[in-house]
Amino acid sequence: MSTQKTELDTRELLIHTALRLFARNGIEGVSLRQITQEAGQSNQSVVQYYFLNKEGLIEAVLGHVAQLLLPSQDEALHRLDVLFQRGVLTPRDVVATAVMPFVLTYAKSDEGRWSIKFLSRMTWQAHSQGFQMVENLLWPYFGRLESHLARTMPNQSREALQIKCLFAIIDLIHGLSSSRLLSASPVVGHLYQQDPRYVTEYLIDYITGGLSFEARWRQEERTAAQP
């Protein structure tokens, strides 16, 4: 086995181990020593060798998650382009198509669930910088979705859509990362156990409603601005 392949394997092992531990225990709840031990590495400086520090490792994990999401995100954007060309695009179509890369990633594998939970942890357990890193990761995708939302909701300002898209990002990753908790709910647990897809459909309704709703004060503000 070549030295280059060995180093690549070690780097990937550290990223996967960090992803799992960050998702399980939180960003601040995991030390570099724990990651090194869980990865079966005897050299305690191995993380520093590949990533310099914990921040560098976190960036590498984010990059790994981005690559995991990318194929299904491209597919979702293509589907929205086709729906728009056919003239049948609605706000719910945009949301339902947009969330599927995250839903499928979460549902397909343990690594997918770790990825969504890691993103959720990053938005509130890694100081304000954590959310900025997640925003930088996901905004290129959601920024392209914004143009489709603008076509289906022409009365919404760009500022309103951008702010609402940021809220939608938070709602999406937090909603998915905690969805399994609903199975223990005395109120809706039976629905989740019957078919977990119910959760996704209601999540889509929830996000669509938030994006589509225009507050009365905004309507009054627009009316007052008219000559």
Image (spheres, grey):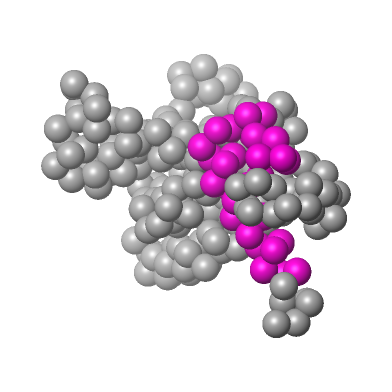
Looking at the image, the residue that sits furthest to the bottom is 1
Magenta span main SS:
helix
Quadrant where the C terminus is found in the figure: top right
Q: Looking at the picture, how far across and down is residue 104, in whole percent?
A: 39, 56
Q: Looking at the picture, how far across and down is residue 154, in whole percent?
A: 50, 44
Q: Looking at the picture, how far across and down is residue 108, in whole percent?
A: 37, 58
Q: Is residue 216 left or right of residue 45?
A: left
Most foreground residue, 157 or 171: 171
Question: Which residues make up the magenta segment?
Answer: 7-35
Most foreground residue, 160 or 206: 206
State whether residue 146 appears in this view: no
> Which quadrant of the view contains residue 210?
top left
User: What residue sits 18% from the left and 45% below the top?
Assistant: 195
Quadrant where the N terminus is found in the figure: bottom right
Most foreground residue, 52 or 190: 52
State whether residue 103 appears in this view: yes
User: What residue sits 47% from the left and 22% below the top?
Assistant: 215
Is 17 inside the magenta-drawn segment? Answer: yes
Is 1 above or below relative to 83? Answer: below
Looking at the image, the residue that sits furthest to the front is 42
Most foreground residue, 110 or 171: 110
Q: Looking at the picture, how far across and down is residue 176, in whole percent?
A: 41, 40
User: What residue sits 43% from the left and 52% below the top?
Assistant: 110
Is 31 inside the magenta-drawn segment? Answer: yes
